[in-house]
Amino acid sequence: MFIDGGVSKLKKIVMDSKRIVAFTGAGFSAESGISTFRGAGGLWTKYDPSIYAEVNRFREDPSYYWRFFRDERYPVIKRAKPNEGHFALAELEKRGKIYRVITQNIDVLHQLAGSSDVIELHGNTRKIFCLSCEREYSMNEAYSLLKEELPPRCSCGGVLKPGTVLFGEPLPKVALDMAMLATRNCDMFLVLGSSLVVYPAASLPRIAKKSGAILVIINIDPTLLDDMADLVINGGTSKLLSRLI
Ligand code: APR
């Protein structure tokens, strides 16, 4: 769909909608300098996720994950700032248009931009826990320990684990339940910057459509769910959203 035609159609759908769920993926934070996972230059083209981000491998040898966190994730997430897209969603929430933001992202940029109703399906990097005593550490505290020792250890001697969901781990139940509820009760489901290949998160657009919502997908690359969408725009999310407000 040609972008300009798409924007006017998008504006109309947003105007006519009352309960919009915004569903964001790594592409939404790409314009904040955080790499995506798939596609050109994606993290999983450099790091094998079954080694660097899988729960059983983490239990066997957490040093892979923590090296990946030290070298790739922490430096980028630490300095990342919300982009125009994040602020546009927060503004649309203030205007009573956005009902929930459901994100696969672990960077907390939605909250930093002022969005309040954010459901984090994959947890976030700002909270890190001891696997033994469950003591909580901040990302910066964990990074300081990481500089001393890899994997980083708690004062009790236990290994620290990220507050993010690793492959092979179930999603946080409360977040998933809230996401399902919001998805079934929205009248517009807006996908922003996700390849829609990771489940159960990627089942939400289909559930929204089945529940009668209008499905809109804004993503640079085509996705497997484009055929069922009411509107597909292959373009950058932040510029497009800022044109909405
Ligand atoms: N605007 C819009 N779309 C973009 C932009 C942009 N500026 N930049 C990249 N994209 C699109 C790409 O075309 C790609 O299809 O964003 C998509 C990002 O897809 P993935 O990298 O697969 O990210 P995501 O869908 O969020 O991955 C889901 O997989 O690795 C796990 O847990 C991780 O939450 C993540 C999950």
Image (spheres, grey):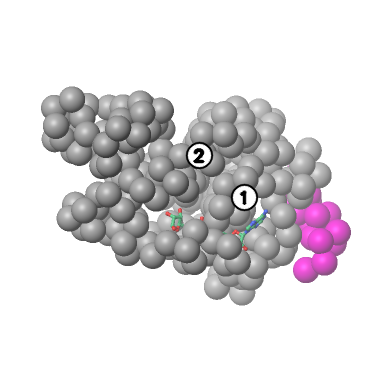
Q: Going 39% across and 65% down the picture, which residue do you hit?
A: 48
Q: Quadrant of residue 241?
A: top right
x, y percent for residue 226: 61, 70
Q: Nearer the viewer, residue 54 or 192?
A: 54
**Secondary structure state at the residue bearing disc 2:** helix
Give the answer, above or below, for where 195 lies relative to 70: below
Q: Which residue is more in the foreground, 134 or 57?
A: 57
Residue at the image point whose x is 50% and y is 39% from the top: 75
Instruction: Describe the element under mark 1 as helix, strand or loop.
Output: helix
- Reading the image, the residue beneath label 2 is 75
Q: Is residue 58 left or right of residue 115?
A: left
Give whichever of discs 1 and 2 has the lower sequence position.
1
In the image, residue 191 above or below residue 242: below
Q: Name which quarter of the figure residue 223 lies in.
A: bottom right
The answer to whether residue 92 is seen in the rendering is no
* Residue 170 belongs to the span the image colors magenta: no
SS majority, magenta: helix
Q: Which residue is mark 1?
A: 30
Q: Nearer the viewer, residue 198 or 206?
A: 198
On screen, 156 above or below 169? above
Tell me the amino acid under the disc marked 1.
Answer: Ala
Viewer-side residue, 138 vs 152: 152
Q: Confirm whether the magenta stretch covers residue 12.
A: yes
Ligand 1 closer than 8 Å to label 1 CB: yes
Number of marks in the rendered image = 2
